Amino acid sequence: MLTALRRADLVVCYSSAVDRHLAVNGMVRRKVVPYFPTIVPKPSTRHAERPRVLFAGRIEAVKGIDVLIRAAREVDAQFVICGDGRRLGRVRALARSVGVEERICFTGWLAPEQLAEEFASASVVAVPSLWPEPLGGVGIEAMATGRPVVASATGGIVDWLVDGVTGLCVAPGDERALAQALNELLADSQRRLAMGVAGKDRVAACFSAEQHVAALAEGYRTARSAWRAAHGVSAVGQRGPGGALAQET
């Protein structure tokens, strides 16, 4: 795999975190092409009984779900866990053992339209990852819906989350800091609203489908130029039989 990547005319990735890994592993011709939201946002809904904290993703240790469950002890909110995974049984058991089971709803995997409804009814979206996320795309989906995000400052997350503007960053694995950040936003509806607006603006400015396509097209042009240079083909023609230069049509 490394050999193929190193020989490529261009290697495309979707975050600065992945780009750094590519650079360390000897990929010289690289381009970051930001990803974009794939869920169609739905209008905001009210949370009648209490604030709602949403988690969406695989139920795996690296996603920090255990940290979120422990942090829930200090946060007066309903927690909605959208997803499935090998640790689901253990996470349910953890919720029982720390006394928050009654405030946690496990929905399982949801269709895009259903997940859009959960985003619309959330107060805050949590992305408490422990590993360096390649991107953490759920945060972009949340911001596109106008929801502030509390997330770990790791990996590609820092590409889209502007601390104090579109949400709050916390240290990975720090359940107290996570609880504090959630409480801070849940206690201030105006700040949540302002962060939601800022998040939508940032997605529109930096993570739109149009920008993705434009950046990808530019990458293809760069790769084509690199291939031409490597194979002795000019920008206005290509080598024919015996090395003769033929005009492009």
Image (spheres, rainbow, N blue to C red):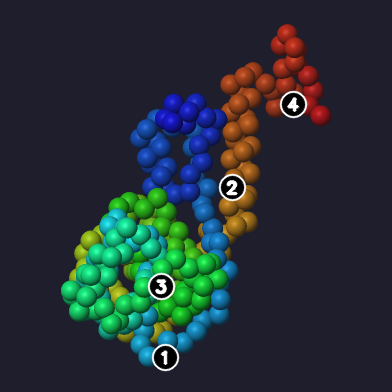
Q: Is residue 90 left or right of residue 34?
A: left
Q: Is residue 75 left or right of residue 122?
A: left
Which corner quadrant of the image does residue 19 belong to? top left
Q: Are marks 1 and 2 in contact (CB under 8 Å)?
A: no
Task: First in sequence, mark 4 or 1: give its number.
Answer: 1
Question: Which residue in the structure is indicated by mark 4?
Answer: 236
Question: Which residue in the structure is indicated by mark 3?
Answer: 107
Q: Residues within 10 Å of mark 2 (few under 14, many from 20)?
A: some
Amino acid type indicated by mark 1: Ala
Question: Which residue in the structure is indicated by mark 2?
Answer: 215
Task: First in sequence, mark 3 or 2: give its number.
Answer: 3
Q: Are marks 3 and 1 in contact (CB under 8 Å)?
A: no
Q: Is residue 144 above or below residue 213?
A: below
- Calculate the distance from the C-alpha at mark 1 to the C-alpha at mark 2: 42 Å
Q: Residues within 10 Å of mark 3 (few under 14, many from 20)?
A: some
Question: What residue occupies the far top of the structure in this picture?
Answer: 242
Question: What residue occupies the far right of the structure in this picture?
Answer: 249
Q: Quadrant of the C terminus?
A: top right
Residue 106 x, y percent position in the rendering:
36, 73
Q: Is residue 186 above or below residue 153?
A: below
Label at residue 48: 1
- Calculate the distance from the C-alpha at mark 2 to the C-alpha at mark 4: 23 Å
Residue 174 x, y percent position in the rendering:
21, 64
Residue 7 x, y percent position in the rendering:
50, 26
Task: First in sequence, mark 3 or 1: give its number.
Answer: 1
Residue at the image position 38 percent from the left and 47 percent from the top? 17
Q: Are marks 2 and 4 in contact (CB under 8 Å)?
A: no
Which corner quadrant of the image does residue 187 belong to? bottom left
> Which is more foreground, mark 3 or mark 2?
3
Task: First in sequence, mark 3 or 4: give its number.
Answer: 3
- Calculate the distance from the C-alpha at mark 3 to the C-alpha at mark 1: 19 Å
